[in-house]
Amino acid sequence: MNWNLDDLYKGFDESYLKDIKKAESLLEDYKKLVESMDQYSTLEFLEAYLLKQEEIELIAHSLYAFASLTTSTDVTNQEALGYLSKLQQLFSSVTKENVMISRWIKDVDLDALGHQSDLIKQYHYVLSLEQKASKHLLSEKEEVLYAKLRQVASGQWGQLQSLLTANLPVELNGKTITLSEVRNLAYEADSVIRKQAYEAELKAYEPIADAVAMSLSNIKREVTMMNELRGYESALQKTLDSSHMEKETLDAMIEAMLDYRPYFANYLKEKALYLGHKNGLPFYDLFAPIGNLNQTYTFEQAQQTVLDAFYGFSPKLGDFAKRAFDNSWLDAFPKKGKRGGAFCSNQPQIKQSRFLLNFTGSLSDVSTLAHELGHGYHGDVISNEAPLNWSYPMPLAETASIFCETIVMNKLYNALDKDEEKLSVLEISLQGDTQVIIDILSRYMFESKLFENSTGPISKDKMKSWMLEAQKAAYQDGLDENYLHPYMWLNKGHYYSAGLNFYNFPYAFGLLFGKGLYSLYQKDSETFLKKYDELLALTGKASVEDAALSMGINVRDKSFWITSLEEVKKDIDKVIELMKKNK
């Protein structure tokens, strides 16, 4: 099952080229507008600027999406890669003008203008963020130079990691398979296959490890240099600003997660005993299925499972998923040249989304399908907002996805009668929670270590060592120290974007915030449904803290995170009880 991109473009054809020409014209108009800004009143110019930005956003979204989605399923597609490069050059051509606007807007009285203009009032939050970011701007010449240099620096280093991992051949039992395929074998019922796949995966990384380590090292060095020049205290500070989130909120969440590590370690040790291990759980058995739900799903069965759960929550959510299935918005299965993992690409300009999966039929894959569709539903809600309010920060990006995942897994669990079947479903869900809380902690620790040492080159051996240290600190004694995963930095694409540093804690935020939301839903579903879409719509025009307060949640308070973690602990206690009962 391949996705259909025709509603964007049917190819890099006359229509695509025509829109590139249109984008070029819009950008020229934008340059002329900025050049003549002195001829306008402050109110007139700001309105003209916002209207032009709306036009640019609409066409840029489609042009980038088509090229990017094309490369996602074929990372060697030179035509698509060429257009991505062309688009980067095209839209970076207005860097000078963007800097001029940011400097100008710094002293604008947005409150006063908002009372005079509905357009400015509508974009008040976005404009206020631009005012805040303006203090970190370099000179116009420096910003233009960096915009050009990053195309051949961090942009290409990230592309190198993508190419090397997407096309990495993995030898397993006399066959050559892709990295996505070998990583999916971690969910196999056969313990011998799981261990063989783990060993084959680690061995396959060795020939590319030096090159990928150099990529990651240079990306983080670039980020550190630029942050110093811009006056940021750290990469984390910049990420928090970009996330519309306060350090107080992050600290409260991380402290709560650290406190709950022993409960996860107990679960992993009990799973190790269940599977016959004595020294903690080997990394290759983290995703081992347990219990007695020996079921794999066809993609059609997975779709129906999700539809049933979504319609049980709300007709609107169910209708959205059905529309995605009926209109070929999904690229479902692994294939050579396709990037690994899963993602949703929202296309609010056409009120659609596209979903990349690497579906192999596991229960975990069903959960992933629900997760990505949740992102799409979020996109569907914000498509009704004004174009410059479509972008929402990373922590809130996981709100709907985690919620939808929870809906599906709870429905599957509640439909079962036998303890061994309930164990299977609940433990699959707990596997995901462990990844998003404990493994995220290890990634957060690892990336913090990277930035602490990012003033010079970092070798693959140091990266491997730091990753092992981070895994030991996060998982504590839950894992077997003889079977950890020193290359977890190599296969996670989030590390390889200069603009997405610390893209790990938002997943934990999303999970725990989602748990808190689900608790509200269970208490009063009718009231919750009235407010839920309003929350999603608010994510592009409010801070994390203010968006949460719209649901009565104070995310600065550690007690909220403890309440959410207690919900996870209930599942840990149930799983441990069921494992002991069903040995």
Image (spheres, grey):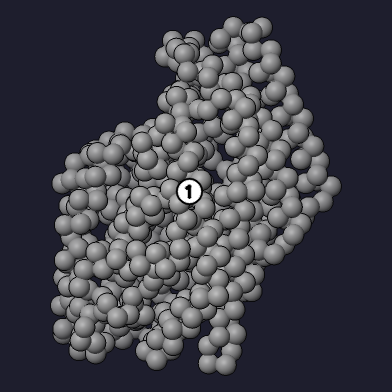
Is 390 on the left or on the right of 553, as rendered?
A: right
Q: Residue at horizontal 52%, vertical 78%?
A: 204
> Closer to the camera, 68 or 462?
462
Find residue 200 and report its horizontal and vertical position in percent.
48, 83
332 sits to left or right of 313:
right
| Residue furthest to the front | 456
Q: Which residue lies furthest to the right in this view?
A: 14
Locate residue 229 relative to residue 85 in the image: left or right: left
Question: Residue 543, how many percent across, how many down?
Answer: 36, 34
Q: Which of 283 and 190 is in front in this view?
A: 283
What residue type is disc 1 on?
Answer: Arg
Q: In the rendered image, which quarter is residue 264 located in?
A: bottom left
Residue 195: give x, y in percent of width and height.
39, 86
Label 1 Cα neighbours within 10 Å, binned few <14 / some 14-19 / many ≥20 = many
Q: Who's the residue at 48% across and 41% down the image?
A: 225
x and y percentages locating residue 275 in the rendered image: 26, 87
Compared to 576, does 190 lie above or below?
Answer: below
Residue hosting label 1: 221
| Residue displayed at 55% across by 81% down | 170
Q: Can residue 360 be seen in this view?
A: no
Quadrant location, the N terminus:
bottom right
Name the secondary structure under disc 1. Answer: helix
Kindly identify the residue that appears in the image at 45 percent across and 66 percent down: 460
Q: How many labels does the image show?
A: 1
Looking at the picture, does residue 430 appear above or below residue 12? Answer: below
Corner quadrant of residue 447: bottom left
Q: Which of 228 and 405 is in front in this view?
A: 228
Q: In which quarter of the image is the C terminus?
A: bottom left
Asked if residue 283 can be seen in this view, the reply is yes
